Amino acid sequence: MNPKKVDKIAVGVIYAMSGVIVLILASLLLFILWRGLPQISWEFLTAPAKSFQVGGGVGIQLFNSFYLLLLTMLISTPLALGAAIYLSEYAKQNWMTDFVRTAIEVLSSLPSVVVGLFGFLIFVIQFDFGFSILSGALALTIFNLPLLTRTIEDSLQAIPATQREAGLALGLSRWETVTRVILPAALPGIITGMILAAGRIFGEAAALIYTAGQSAPALDFTNWNPQSITSPLNIFRPAETLAVHIWKINSEGVMPDGAEVSAGASAVLIIAVMLFNLGSRYLGRKLQKKATSA
Amino acid sequence: MKLKKFRILLTLMAGLVLTACGEVVDEESITAVGSSALQPLVEAAGEQYSAENLGKFINVQGGGSGTGLSQIAADAVDIGNSDIFAEENTGIDASKLKDHRVAVVGITPIVTPGTGVTNVTLEELQGIFTGEITNWKELGGIDLPITVLNRSSGSGTRATFEKWVLGDDLKSVVSQEQESSGTVRQIVANTPGTISYVAFSYVNDDVEALSINGVEPTDKNVSTNEWIIWSYEHMYTNGEPTGLTKDFLDYMLSQEVQGGLIEALGYIPITKMQVERDFEGNTIPAENP
Amino acid sequence: MEETQSKFTQKSQKRKFEQFGRTISFICIAFIVLVVLSILYFVISKGLSTFTTDGVSVIDFLFGNTWRPGEVGENGAPLVGALPMILGSFYVTLLSAVLATPFAIAAAIYMIEISPKNGKKILQPVIELLVGIPSVVYGFIGLTVIVPFIRNIFGGTGFGILSATMVLFVMILPTVTSMAVDALNAVPRHYREASLAMGGTRWQTIYKVVLRAATPGLLTAVVFGMARAFGEALAVQMVIGNAALVPTDLITPASTLTSILTMSMGNTVMGTLENNVLWSLATILLVMALFFNILTRWIGKKGAMKK
């Protein structure tokens, strides 16, 4: 056959298949939004959940999701960053490094319920943190470290070797080269990694059921004493997140409007993820501008 | 520049930990873990209790009856919620545990509407769940294959259903399984010819509850034991309860919960039961009928 | 004099700094490795106790096809054959990967070779959004859309490997696509230019040069997608039917390792056979993850050697 014809046909097929993907993904998103958006109101976003009556909201769950995300990121980002720097800049290419990489990646394919139970037995029971945001954040950290380390390492590696050499040639130590040259340059990649990780944190349910728990005690948003159970800041209070709430409604929920609340909560979750992604991208661009010009 | 950030992060984290150990507030909380069937009730009661007793918090979590029994036996929590007697579970030292029965749930077979069958005999029900009866027309319904849907093995609802329907000798056919009542109800509602079982509180218009031997699945029939598929909801403590735990358990048995919340949530108050059953299934008339 | 001496004998500020950085990053990696190893130890030791404490034979466990934990068979051994779940996991994983791969590669080609602008603007944000949807929602949509669809077309109940494959297909698509994009991105620009300069058409360049050069990376993407499919629980559990039967076709209910594991975990009492055997399932999952991982590495090495 004429190569030009083949070219046309092949490109056409690719267009069609990409079109199918966009169609599937877009209709998935639209389906969720279409079912959920009508449920969303200011009331829904701020009211506490009801366990068996009509009219529950997701206010506390929404706050918990963000707070848990923040805490998990605070714990896991420095760890993953350090580990990725070591793997990418210091580690020798030998079987030990290979072993470490394999071990980390194997962890990432464990079903999250196993991580959740591990967190339950270790953090909740052994360390006596109880069902709490802290236990949840630690479990999510375990769950997230492999992916985060891996993506940060990849984005560090993607920086051309010439940049490192330039740094060393200027008389910077390796550590200074990494922190002042490589990291700012790799920032967009790191941000993408963090966004993907954040998405998983927002959407994770099974690992949290046994750690952060599935109840959301009423919060008093005027109480800022972190020791009080009703304080939103307390890291030792149980905290049901949005994803866990959706799971709970679908599995054992007895409220009559369960289907509506679950649809609304799913839409809120997607919008939250979207806002978070946009926000962190914007922030990342600003940060990079500052870091690379300084 | 990055180093600075590290430091900020570390200070922030240290700050969080420090403030957590700061001032002491006069608050008290207990944790109850276990049965997901009992969870909504204890949660609602806990909220109500907290509203009436400022500074007292009841932290209620699910995780399943197995988790509840394991953790209360290990003394890791204050209350272990369970759908089944601790004695029925191997691997649990029931002698140390104190049983508090707070409610009763009736369990009923449910089917997709439109099978043409609304009443079965106990033998027929056994036939369905052991796989001997495979089409609704054998029971006088329409020509439609029967799909059996079980709860996952070990679930309290399944244990109760099999104990009273299949007995000790019959074994359920290998079938589809689902983990939660909500999913079971949804699948039964949407898949023609499916049969499963849920607690009374999960029955709605989307599914049809079956009568057995002409007895309808109602709270009243449970309280007289005419409807035999029911179980207690247990709240176990390790040894005699004290302090807040005792106070809360008393509250669970008070008229406020028994007469109000329990019925609102679709459970049957323990105070209404005219019979009592022990873990071997022996029936005795209740002390306070 | 003393000042000069100290300058030579003491570590310089820079060196101290360097050591500080090195130590910090080493502590991070050491900590992570410690956590990983303790989880692995935790899971495997519990998983092995099925065989050591409860005396189940490994052969019976791996190749037995009756799964009724808590009951014993005619020979007195517990009925804990995991073969139905192992096969179920394999089928859904392989099928969803086979289905997702061509679509993911086509999308990646579109984003990198044909229309990078549109790709970056539309596909990438959508993919990042999809990662954040909880599995429960995927499962719920599978239950309300895919299961009735399959039932109407193929008959049966609609629950089974086919439905699970469809749900997993959508779930792993973002992962595989974004990794395939990375793989195509890594192909040096001058490869394409050389091919086009020799008079190759766009498709010839893509098919004979870019895809060939990116093969190891693409395979890695597929393997990662398979690992994700293998470990997915909540969504699969809602649509596969969870019947512990050796799968005979695609539209009868089956089960996977993770679906059974997640379903039964909370209902069993720690330390009993019923609980231990679930940890054994988790151990199989770990071994499988290790297998996928080694496969990825092996493919990567083979590809690298050809260059």
Image (cartoon, grey):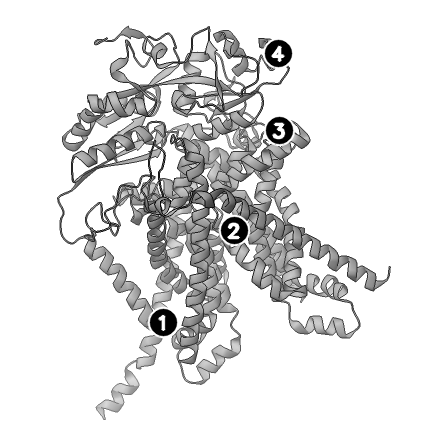
Q: Residue B133, position in %: x, y?
A: 58, 12
- What's the CA distance linking mark 4 and mark 3? 22 Å
Q: Chain of mark 3?
A: C
The one of B269 and A131 positioned closer to us in this rendering: B269
Disc ID at residue C252 = 3
Q: What residue is pinned by disc 2? A: C130
Q: Amino acid at mark 2?
A: Leu
Q: Are marks 2 and 4 on the same chain?
A: no
Q: Residue A82, position in %: x, y?
A: 39, 64
Q: What residue is pinned by disc 1? A: B2
Quick check: A273 left or right of A71? right
For the residue carrying disc 3, how many other residues have a C-alpha within 10 Å: few (<14), some (14-19), or many (20+)? Answer: many
Q: Chain of mark 2?
A: C
For the residue carrying disc 2, how many other residues have a C-alpha within 10 Å: few (<14), some (14-19), or many (20+)? Answer: many
Q: What residue is pinned by disc 4? A: B137
Quick check: C233 left or right of B141? left
Q: Residue A212, position in %: x, y?
A: 33, 44
Q: Are marks 1 and 4 on the same chain?
A: yes
Q: Amino acid at mark 1?
A: Lys
Pointers 4 and 3 in contact (C-beta within 8 Å): no
Pointers 1 and 3 in contact (C-beta within 8 Å): no
Q: Amino acid at mark 3?
A: Thr
